[in-house]
Amino acid sequence: MTENLSWRFQGNELRYLVEVLESGFKAGADGAFTTRLEKEFSDSHKSKYAIAFNSGTSTLHAILLALGVGCGDEVLVPSLTPLMCGLTPHYTGATPVYIDVNKDTFLMDPLDIVEKITEKTKAIMVVHMYGAVCDMKAILQIAKEFDLPIVEDCAQCHRGQTESGDFAGTLGIAGSWSFENSKQLTSGDGGIVTTDDEDIATRIRKIGGLGFKTLTAGAGRVRTDRDKLQNPDWERFDAIGYNYRMNQLAAAVALAQVEKQDYFIGLRKLSGKKYTQSLLGSNLLTPQKIISGNINSFYTFSAKFNVDQNDVTWYDFRKKYMEFGGDGIYAASKLLYQEPIFRDLKIGRHTTPVAEVLQKQLMNFTTNQANESEMDRQCEILEKTRKFYGDL
């Protein structure tokens, strides 16, 4: 049956889904699929605790709430990132403060972090964009100096690594990942959190699980023994929480994906390597700079289009690339404070001049090819487009 499925789901996805349905959504002796997913994920990231969620947005919201972020607080976030990273501080009542980016790495600029820390700053939300890992050595030093927790958003950075070999998401107080459809590992929708802090893990799980008192850092099962559960005096809730739990079908697919994560990330890395080779000597396009020693997991292959090098426009290049048969070239999202809802409501504080220029220059190429042949095809088209514009 698996031969009729997408190449992305040729592992245990179908078998696990059938197991869930055959069980009638009841957890077996080895625990529910969320439990199995959490163990697989925490073990593979060398983290003590993992908690499964229904999205990579609810994960961030829960982490911030667990850290006590609320009205009157400020959370530092990069301006060059999807809206969710600004929404989640706003959900808590806090103010997002936008951090500029480095013009070469396209990632949070540690110098701007220092400039924007105030007595109201409650947390630093680090976002590892496009598969690249931020300058964690510098950011960790800043966080230590100012006694601030780091929240790592790894929605676009499954299995990215620092020069010391640590996985992105395991260096701050908590890491957050997404399993949304476009991500390197997917269950259609979903998310997961890791942390080594038992107290924070317990709070995160209760926030995501409606506040059931039976929830712990390491256990997400709500039901207890039948005598207690069926007793009219049994009290169920001891915290305010949200219904952010991952369902068993999503957990089944996510588990199968995590089991093959090295395979999936290996494909992305190979694609990124091939694109990099294809742009050697280019004046039109400059690839995202990888911080020395870090490993990029290439959620996408991001490059800066150097508009001052030629009369060709960003739009011309993308159109010609697609005419030659290339996948679409994606632009960077508008900066958080440029999105209509944040702009009109004047949400957050901002001065990020580098990001304002860079956002209009970035070209993000697809890295979700099924095999090397498909990767080579995209690179050939990229080189053909460069040649058309005299860049090769």
Image (cartoon, rainbow, N blue to C red):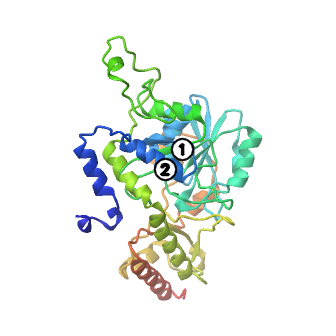
Tell me what residue is drawn at x 28 percent, y 45 percent: 20
Which disc number belongs to residue 102? none
Which amino acid, by three-letter code, is at mark 1? Thr
Q: Position of residue 100 (x, y in %)?
A: 64, 53
Q: Give the left or right position of residue 130, taking residue 221 as reference.
A: right
Q: Give the left or right position of residue 284, taking residue 228 as reference.
A: right
CA neighbours of label 1 inside 10 A, class few (<14), some (14 to 19), many (20+):
many
Query: Image height check: is 361 above or below 381?
Result: above
Tell me what residue is drawn at x 35 percent, y 62 percent: 11
Q: Which residue bears the numbered disc 1?
A: 194
CA neighbours of label 2 inside 10 A, class few (<14), some (14 to 19), many (20+):
many
Q: Position of residue 336 (x, y in %)?
A: 52, 49
Which amino acid, by three-letter code, is at mark 2? Phe
Q: Give the left or right position of residue 365, taking residue 287 as reference.
A: left
Badge nearest the viewer, 2 or 1? 2
Q: Using the rendered image of the protein, determine whether residue 243 is visible from the camera's viewpoint.
A: yes
Q: Which residue bears the numbered disc 2?
A: 41
Identity of the residue furthest to the top in this view: 233
Query: Image height check: is 293 above or below 157?
Result: below
Tell me what residue is drawn at x 52 percent, y 30 percent: 203
Alpha carbons under labels 2 and 1: distance apart:
8 Å
Identity of the residue furthest to the right in this view: 145
Determine whether label 2 and label 1 are within 8 Å by CB: yes
Q: Using the rendered image of the protein, determine whether residue 69 is visible from the camera's viewpoint.
A: no
Local SS, label 2: helix
Q: Position of residue 359 (x, y in %)?
A: 54, 61
Which callout, 2 or 1, points at the residue further toward the start of the chain? 2
Q: Give the left or right position of residue 227, taking residue 342 as reference.
A: left
Q: Position of residue 357 (x, y in %)?
A: 59, 62
Query: Image height check: is 337 above or below 201?
Result: below
- Name the residue nearer the viewer: 222 or 28: 28
Local SS, label 1: strand
